[in-house]
Structures are given as structure tokens and as C-alpha cells.
Image (spheres, coloured by chain):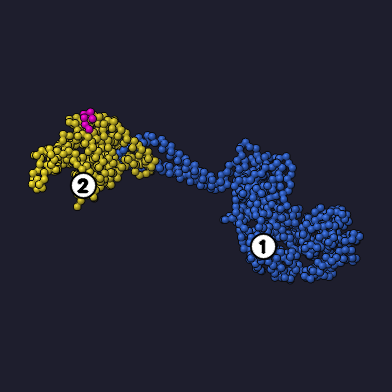
Amino acid sequence: MTFLAPLLLLAAAALAVPLLLHLRRQRDTRVEAFPALRYLRSTLRERTRMVRLRRLLLLALRLLVLTLLVLAGARLVLPLAGGDQPPAGVALIVDNGLSSLSVVGEERALEAVREMAMEAVARLGVDDRVWVLATGEPWRPAPPLDREAAAARIRTMDGTAVTGDLDAAVSRARALLRTGSAEPRRILVVSLLAPGTLPSSGPPAAVEDDTPIPLLVGRPALDLPTNRGVARAQVDGGLAPRAGRPISLSVQVTGEPQGGQPFRVVVGDELVSRGVTDDRGEALVELPPQGEGWLAGRVELDPDPLRADDVRHFAAPVLPPPRVDVRGDPGRYLQAAVDLLAERERIEPGPGGISLEAGRPVPGAPSAPTLLLAPSDPADLGGVNRRLRELGVPWTLEPLADHLPPVVVDRSDPRLGLPQGLEVRRRYRLMPPSNGSDAGIEVAVLSDGTPWAILHGGGMGTAGSGAADSGSEERSPAVLLLASPADPVWSDLPTSVGMLPFVSGALDILAGGAATPDVVAGTPLALPAGTTEVEAPDGTRRAADGIGGFAETGRPGIYGFRDETGALLGTAVVNAAAPTSEPFLTPAQAAERWDREPRGRLIVVPGCGE
Amino acid sequence: MSSPSDPRGRRADLLTPEQLAALGGLEFQARAIVEGALLGLHRSPKRGFSSEFAEHRNYRPGDEIRHVDWRMYARSDRYYVKQYQDETNLRAYLLLDVSASMDWSSDPGRIPSKLQVARLLAAALALLLLRQGDRTGLGIFDGTIRSWLAPRGGRGHWAELARRLRDTAPGTATDPSEALRTAGLKLRRRGLVILLSDLLMEQDALLRSLGFLRHRGHQVVVLHLMDPGERDLQGRGQVLFRDPETGDELRVDVTEMRRRYRVEVEEAVARWRGRLGGAGVEHHLVDTGQPLEQALKAVVRARGRMG
């Protein structure tokens, strides 16, 4: 037996009212002369016992009604399972993600989610084991709890700006249940089933298992209001802005409504610009030039029921234009990109800065930060590998067969601006150092798991493992090596929209900075090498374990990465997912999606949603 | 100025006791009631040629010449005969219960007590009977006979009878046995016995006493007086009721008992009516909140059946 609102049990004091009335009625009597007492006596003979009984029944009924009202107010729930039922293992997936922050009426939708989850917990048996999985906090461990502890966990659960991945949560729930010994098992999902919580890539395939796991989906019957939010706040088209130069800020509002939305741009604590979106929800504003350093700000809309996506943060390092010395044969595409960057004053062509090398290596190249693109002619590989050794890079390029099927870019350092799914038809094999040390960082990885680009040396961290170069007292210059030339025969990069951001981003990385990655809340942040602390938007600092990045990104804002001296190594921007106009799912649609469980059952909570 | 029989444009026998009380003293009220009742009856039940002049009527062949009113003939040149109200051989006995229970009203400021209504009714009946030539007596009793007036006729007798009624104070407990037995022994000639009582007494004892009267050849009419508050419990909540005769007390929740009590009273009245009827006694319920016309008519009908 559990009370969801135990404080309301205080209302049980009202039970004293009928008791007092009953007792007072016994005492409160007036005296009157009445001659026809014999008729009364005769009536009473028949009625006294019945009247007394009726009065007691009335008292009992009043007490019962009051007791039921108190229990209903205190939200008494009894377990459905009988005492002789074996303990069950239950994975309770609670959606405390972005949509739960919507304000419906006077309170957040999270309250309704928590209430439904509490009711589900209260129906569990005393010995049942519960894993509570909060989709808004996917980084949070989910130890097995008893019913009371699970209720306490839900009571204290807060919403986050993470767009919870229900597919991932269901997969995780299955895995957790299969590690436990409790039987029977079941998965309960309490979610608003907002668009985005079920990724379009589809659920992961269920694991074959002898024991099916029933699935139960519940959606609080809430009519969520329409929502709009800032989907984009991009500085200089995703490139690092240049010091002393005007900075453009591209703003996009999505959801409903998106056109004609007034917004404000705040840098630091200063309001620097205002604007109104056009019919497509877009706007481009110019920010005042900034000095060298960090540009951090936010775009704000007037609040709507979902406040979390009405603000979008942005951050970028403001750099002076790096000097770039193009050597070898860059090819027409790479040269065009360099020319355009120079025209826009994002780089200064000339020696003394970064060396951009492509094609056959040119003798006498300096030992400087280098962007090195693999040669088109395999005959030049030997020279390139020698150049790599000169630069202190232990990686080598080796030829691959030409007839291999094309692959795509699977993941890459966001600062490089490589479009995901970029097709790579030919590339060299990047051979890592044999001793495994001083490996540098894989900044672009292909769909077959092999690296396409690596960053080595220079002591500059970037996304990835967080490994720092070590082993030599004299640091080698930073080298970014791409395993394909800028040739459309080899990949789509030269002809894609990612070419210019790639070249600019790579040069910025080599120059000591690059545009700050902008990720959706809930995405783990890759830590730059040397990061010992992560500073959250609220100013709190958490120690970085240096293993799997930083996962607790439920709060939108700018996260800072600091080394052991407290110096800022880099930043990352975390924002809520952009709103869409897609409809919410029904429990039936969601459950159908997960009904691939072998021999599993599908149960839709009656009265919840459709 | 309104006549006594029609103080507000209505016959006095159609007025409630409450309205009658505004007319004046007992005698005046009784006269007003009787006048009204006679208007309703249209004629006196007994007319003859013996003692008291009643009215004229046209001469019809067969009428005795000595009854022709020659003075009327001289004035109108038409023959009229005189009619006289006859004095009958009937004896009527009014037996009035003045026990403590009779001296009660559920709304003393508005509704007269049962005793006040019984006095008025007895006076009116006496006047009515005396006007018809019946000799009328009066017995007042509670536990014993408190006052006895032998049946006689004449206006002077009614004045004495009304005085006794007016001066009688409420008594104590009711025991009709002795009073009725004594009355039965005193009433040697066959007559009409009218008992005015609230019947808050032992039913068997009263039936035995009335049976004795019936056995002696008397016609018996019981006027059962009830206050409206005795038929329907008034008020609400818990009440400690005290019997004015015995001092017994009973705690009752009026709200809960009201409906059942009403049924019980109706059943009790029906029992009285049934058992009295079975004993050859006419029972008539008199609601002290209602006009007395029906009670008077009941007595007149009973009187009429006795010839």
C-alpha cells in the first residue's frame, strides 16, 4: 500500500466531524410536554432498534465516505499483484526529456508523467525490482531499486532539455532486465511520445532470447500546446570568426509559428542586436566586431510554453587570420577554397604560418603546423611518408585496392564541418604507429571503422579520446592528415558544401582554435586533450574522467573545458533540439514500433492517450 | 355589524376554533355555531304543535281549525296555521373528559387546547339539542366524575350547563371506567350519550364502559379530539417528550420518527374507529385546528336516527 500524496492523510482529521455530530446529537435535546406519548411509545417499540441501527449505519457510512475521500486525496494505490506472485523485474522508462518541460495549464507536463509513473510503481509488488530509466538523463546509472526507492527516485526526478531516445532506453531496459534474475520481466514506458523521442532510424534489432519481455506504454492524456524555438544560431556560417571583422549570425526559428518572430541577441550580458524572422523563420544579423578571444552569446525568443528551446546559445573562438603557405599541387578545388578564404580575409596567404601541402611533397618545407592531403598519384606515397616522418608523425599512408566499395564518413570532429554520410570512393590506408603510442587523434572515421583523417602533435586537443601527445620533450608541430586528395574521383568532399568549412576548420584547428561544436542536449561531449574539469553552464565544475567524454549535458548552455591549471582549452555549446511540427505519437504507434520483441506482448494502457 | 352566525361573511360552524375564539365568550361562540349549523340544516328536526311557536305555514285541508292564526288571516286575508317546536322524550348526555392531556395545544398562541374546543363543542351541542327539545345533561370527568348535571330542558338549563363548562378546570389522569359506569347507572332512560375526549386512555377499559352504556340501550357517539400537533410531530431533532398526565418521558428524534409516527397515529385512529364501530359506537374525529361543522353534523345525524 502506497500513498502518492501522503500529506493529504492529514485530512483524516475530518473524520472527527461526523463523530462529534453523532455524539452531540445524543446530548442536544429539548424538553416538551406531549400527551400522545402512547402513540410515540408504540412507534418507538418498532423503530428504536432500527433507528439506532440506522444512525450507526449513517455514522459508519459518513466515516467511510470521508475515509475514502481522504485515501483518494492521498492517492492510495494498492498493488495489483497478489502476495503469492513471484517478484518481478520491471524496467520503468520515464520520459523526463525536453517535451516534459512544456507548461500545460499551471504546471509542467513532467508532473503528469511523474504521476503516471508513480501510479505504475505503486501497483508493483513489495518484492519487485525496479530499474528506473530517465530518458532525459541517459548518462545516469539505473541500479535495481525496491518499490519505495523507485517512488522516491521518481518524486525527485527533474526534467532536462535532452530529447530522450526511447529506442535507446528500451534497448537499455531489455539489457538490464536480462542481466537480472527476477521473473517475470516487463518494461513500462511513460512518455509524452514527442516527435524526436523515436529516432527515424528505427529501433535496434531485438536480441534473441528465450524469455519475451512484455511492453506497456502509457502516455499522460495531455494536450500539449504548439511550440516554436530557435533551431539555429550560427556564427560566420560555422567558421571561427576573425578578430576585428564584422561577424554574421544566422538565426532560424522552427516549429509553430516560425515567421515574424522577434528575437534578441545577447553577447555576454549585453544586448547587441535584435531582429525578426522572415516567413521561413530565418534571419541574418551582423554582430559588432570582436577582439581576439571567445565570443559567447545567445539568441532569445519571447517565452512560450516550452521555454528550453526559446534560447539558443552559441560560442566561437575569435582568431586573427592565420598565415597559410600553399605548397605542392593543391588541385583546383583546394586552391579555390584557399583563394576564397583569402578573399574573405579569413586567411593570409604567405609563408611563416601553416603549411598546406598536397600532391608531391616539395623539398625544404618548414617544420610548421601542416594540413597534409594525400597525393593523387600513389607513386608519391614514399615522399609523403618521408614528409610525415620529418614532421614527427608516426602514421603512414599505404595504398588500398581500387575496387573496394565506397564508404561514407561515419563520424568526424564537428569543427571540421564534414557532412555526415559524405561518400569516399578511394583513399589510402592510414597505418597507425606499431607501438601504439603517440597515435594522435582520429578526427574522421569511415563507415568501415578505419580512420580517414588524423590529427597529430602540437599539443592541441580535439574531439575524441582525449589522448595527449607525450614521449618527447620537444613537441612536434600539429599535423592534420587526410587520407584522400581533394579530388572528386576520390570523394565527394571537393564538390560538397563541406569543402570550405573543412579547409577553414582544419586551418583553424592548426592555428590553435576552431568553431565550437554545437551539440544537442544529451550528446556526450568529447574532451580536448588535457581536460581535467568541465565547467557546466551554471558555473559548477565536474572532474573529467578522461575516458568517455562528458555525458551530463542535460542543461543547455556553454560548457567549458579546463586543464589542471584552470586554463580554458575549449568550449562546447549544448542546445535543446530544434522543435518540429511533427505530431506526437500515440501509445499504440510507439508500442507497434517496439513490438519486434520475440513473442513479446503489446499492452497499451487504457485511457492514456489514444 | 355582522351577525353572530356570520361574523366574517361565513357561518360560524365553518370557522376554526382559532377564528371562533375571536368572537367572544363560550356562550356567544356556542350560539354562533348553532345558528350557523341550523342554517346548514335548513330546518329544525322536530316541529309540532305542543309548546313553543316555531313558524307559520299555509293552511292545508285536514289541518285543525284551532291552529289557524286568525290574526294573520285578518292582516293578510289568507289562512296560516301556527307550528310549534315540540319537546321530545329524548335524553342526551354530554360526557366531557377534562383530564390533563386535554389541556394541551401544540401551538398555544394559535390553536385552542383540546379542552377549550371540547367545552365549546359541548356548549354548542347542548344548545342545539335543547333547541330541538331534547333534555340534555352534562357529566365532567377525569379520573372520577367531577361534575354532574341531570338532563333537563329550557334556556335556563343551557345557561347553567354553559357556566359549568366554563368554570371547569383541567383535571388529572383519565380513567373513564368509573365515570361512564356511574353515568350509565344514572341514565335510567334511553338516550344519546356523547363522549368528548382525546381518547388517550386504555382502549379496552373504555370499550368495556361504552359497552355497558350500549347494553343499557343508549346511542353513543364519541367525538375524538385531536390536536394537529398530535397527528403530525412538529419541529426537528432530538426532543425529550414528557406526558403531562403521568410524567413519563421519552427521547425521540422527531426528524426520524415523523413519518412513522403519522402512520402509527392513523392506524391508532383506525383502530379506535374499527373497535368502536364494532361495539355499535359511532366515532368521529375532531381536529381542533379545523371547523366544528362536521362534528355537529355527526351528532345531528345520530340524533336523527333516534327519531
Percent position (x, y) of residue A100? Answer: 63, 54
State the residue at coordinates (61%, 38%).
A82
Frontmost of labels 1 and 2 is 2
Percent position (x, y) of residue A378? Answer: 90, 59
In the rendered image, the quadrant that contains the C terminus of chain B is top left
Answer whether residue B37 is visible to the viewer in this image. no
Mark-to-mark CA distance, 1 and 2:
100 Å
- Say whether residue B172 is magenta: no
- Which chain is home to disc 1? A
In magenta, the rendered stretch is: B214-219
Tell me the kind of residue under disc 1: Val
Evaluate whether label 1 is on the same chain as label 2. Answer: no
Tell me the kind of residue under disc 2: Ser
The image quarter containing residue B162 is top left
Instruction: Classify A280 as above or below B20.
Output: below
Name the residue nearer the viewer: A439 or A474: A439
Which chain is painted in blue? A
The image quarter containing residue B166 is top left
State the residue at coordinates (41%, 43%).
A24
Q: Which mark is residue B5?
A: 2
Q: Secondary structure at mark 2?
A: loop
Q: Secondary structure at mark 1?
A: strand
State the residue at coordinates (86%, 67%).
A327
Q: Which mark is residue A253?
A: 1
The image quarter containing residue B17 is top left
Percent position (x, y) of residue B5? Answer: 21, 47
Name the residue nearer the viewer: B182 or B91: B91
Q: Which mark is residue B110?
A: none
State the residue at coordinates (75%, 61%).
A569
Q: In the rendered image of this protein, which colour is used for chain B?
A: yellow
